[in-house]
């Protein structure tokens, strides 16, 4: 057992955190206010090699381990949760190709992402199906030498800028998860992109509905086999949920750091807030939650890197870190008092941003459902 980062991981951590502090943080409030996709910052992150961490070295990627990508994600989320969501959503969309694609598909779809800054979107959720992912209604119909894709997707991160979509669809909704197929769709005719959603948090990340109207999908764009997309989706989430959890750790660490700094600066009743036990106990609880979340993330990543099942740990990490981030951010606002409720201080944004982590990539309740299933039926 070794809790030390390797020298290479320390280097990646320092570089990503420096980028977060110098490039992301100073602009985070402005992009949040304007609810604008921070393209120049995303491009800089790509140039530094901090985007698409899942692409293996043989397809032009950096060959990062899952642990490396957690370190990067935590650091970037420290800078801005919304910007990090835009970055992380690329990995979420490319992971199904890494997991279920053929060598030819990996070369065709992944390598271009290492040659130029490109954006990808993962299309699972639909207007009527969020938590119940197996209830997908978007259809895939055989049409001779190609398939036709029809249906509506909802809450799709990066949708307005995506060059490539990984879409989950069904050959027969009655088959539930056994009819789900994963296809890669490159930007083309028949894809209708909705208006940008006006969200509470992660406001600079681009979230929209996407409609597929008779979109022609080449047969060679099916990942794995027809009707075998469900396992690809679930394995993708096993990898991406620890990343989302790492983003919660980054956000919570940022909220904690702000609260500690402010509690040393502000005085009440003749001494700094940090001298009051009521505040000390809050800060101690916040610090424990951040560190416990980080340890769960690292264990979920370690299991991935050692090719061991990590579904249960991924859900432990996701539920625990998301709930912890919400609590830590709320307490950071409390430490700041009235000032914390103002947009002038960064903890207000962190509290809004924390909420989404309890919702996307499987709500905190779905994570508990997964954990219970693992305990009662699968273990
Ligand atoms: N790996 C491999 N197989 C798995 C698996 C895993 N992690 N989890 C489940 N399976 C298998 C099961 O073993 C079962 O296999 P059999 O058919 O052989 O029995 C099959 O999948 C069906 O499993 P369940 O019976 O558990 O399926 P369910 O429909 O009852 O529940 C669920 C599944 C876990 C609730 C799933 O629907 C789920 O994860 N829902 C949440 C969806 C989600 O996370 N959406 C996020 C969207 S992406 C997003 O948010 C991105 C963004 O904005 C940035």
Image: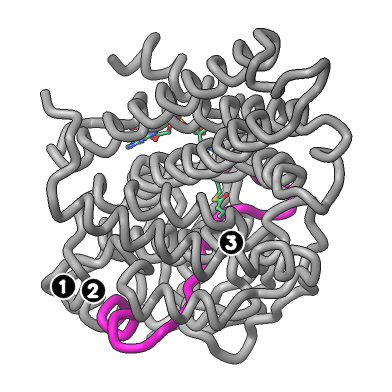
Query: Do the numbered discs 1 and 3 sit on residues whose CB atoms are within 8 Å?
Result: no
Mark 2 or mark 3, which has the lower sequence index? 3
Q: Residue 178 location in percent, x, y?
A: 42, 44
Q: Residue at x 83, y 30 (%)?
A: 337
Answer whether residue 132 is magenta in the image: yes
Identify the residue position indicated by label 1 in the image. Answer: 103
Identify the residue position indicated by label 2 in the image. Answer: 106
What is the crowding at mark 3: few (fewer than 14 residues within 10 Å), some, or many (at least 20)?
some
Residue 152, above or below 375:
below
- What's the mark number on residue 25? 3
What is the crowding at mark 1: few (fewer than 14 residues within 10 Å), some, or many (at least 20)?
few
Q: Residue at x 18, y 75 (%)?
A: 59
**The one of 255 and 193 positioned closer to us in this rendering:** 255
- The quarter in which the C terminus is drawn is top left
Query: Do the numbered discs 2 and 1 sit on residues whose CB atoms are within 8 Å?
Result: yes
- The quarter in which the N terminus is drawn is top left
Mark 1 or mark 3, which has the lower sequence index? 3
Q: Is residue 189 left or right of residue 334?
A: left
Local SS, label 3: helix
- Residue 134 seen by the camera: no
């Amino acid at each position: 057992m070794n809790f030390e980062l390797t020298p290479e991981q320390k280097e990646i951590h320092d570089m990503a955190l420096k980028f977060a502090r110098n490039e992301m943080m100073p602009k985070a409030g402005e992009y949040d206010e304007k609810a604008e996709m921070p393209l120049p910052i995303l491009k800089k992150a790509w140039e530094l090699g901090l985007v698409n961490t899942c692409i293996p070295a043989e397809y032009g990627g950096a060959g990062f381990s899952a642990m490396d990508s957690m370190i990067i994600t935590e650091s970037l989320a420290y800078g801005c949760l919304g910007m990090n969501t835009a970055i992380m959503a690329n990995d979420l969309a490319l992971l199904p190709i890494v997991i279920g694609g053929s060598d030819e598909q990996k070369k065709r779809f992944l390598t271009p992402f290492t040659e130029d800054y490109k954006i990808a979107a993962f299309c699972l959720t639909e207007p009527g199906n969020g938590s119940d992912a197996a209830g997908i209604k978007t259809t895939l119909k055989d049409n001779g030498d190609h398939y036709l894709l029809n249906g509506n997707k909802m809450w799709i991160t990066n949708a307005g800028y995506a060059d490539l979509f990984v879409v989950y669809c069904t050959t027969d909704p009655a088959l539930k998860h056994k009819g789900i197929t994963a296809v890669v769709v490159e930007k083309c005719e028949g894809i209708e992109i909705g208006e940008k959603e006006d969200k509470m948090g992660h406001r600079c990340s681009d979230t929209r509905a996407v409609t597929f109207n008779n979109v022609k999908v080449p047969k060679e764009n099916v990942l794995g086999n027809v009707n075998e997309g469900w396992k690809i989706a679930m394995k993708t989430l096993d990898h991406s949920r620890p990343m989302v959890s790492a983003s919660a750790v980054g956000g919570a660490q940022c909220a904690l750091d702000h609260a500690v700094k402010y509690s040393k600066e502000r005085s009440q009743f003749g001494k700094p807030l940090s001298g009051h036990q009521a505040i000390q106990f809050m800060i101690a609880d916040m610090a424990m939650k951040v560190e416990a979340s980080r340890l769960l993330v690292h264990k979920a990543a370690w299991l991935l890197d050692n090719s061991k099942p990590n579904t249960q740990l991924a859900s432990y990490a996701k539920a625990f870190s998301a709930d912890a981030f919400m609590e830590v951010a709320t307490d950071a606002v409390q430490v700041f008092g009235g000032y914390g409720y103002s947009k002038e201080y960064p903890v207000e944004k962190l509290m809004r941003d924390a909420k989404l982590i309890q919702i996307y990539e499987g709500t905190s309740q779905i994570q508990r459902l997964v954990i219970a299933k693992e305990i009662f039926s699968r273990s």
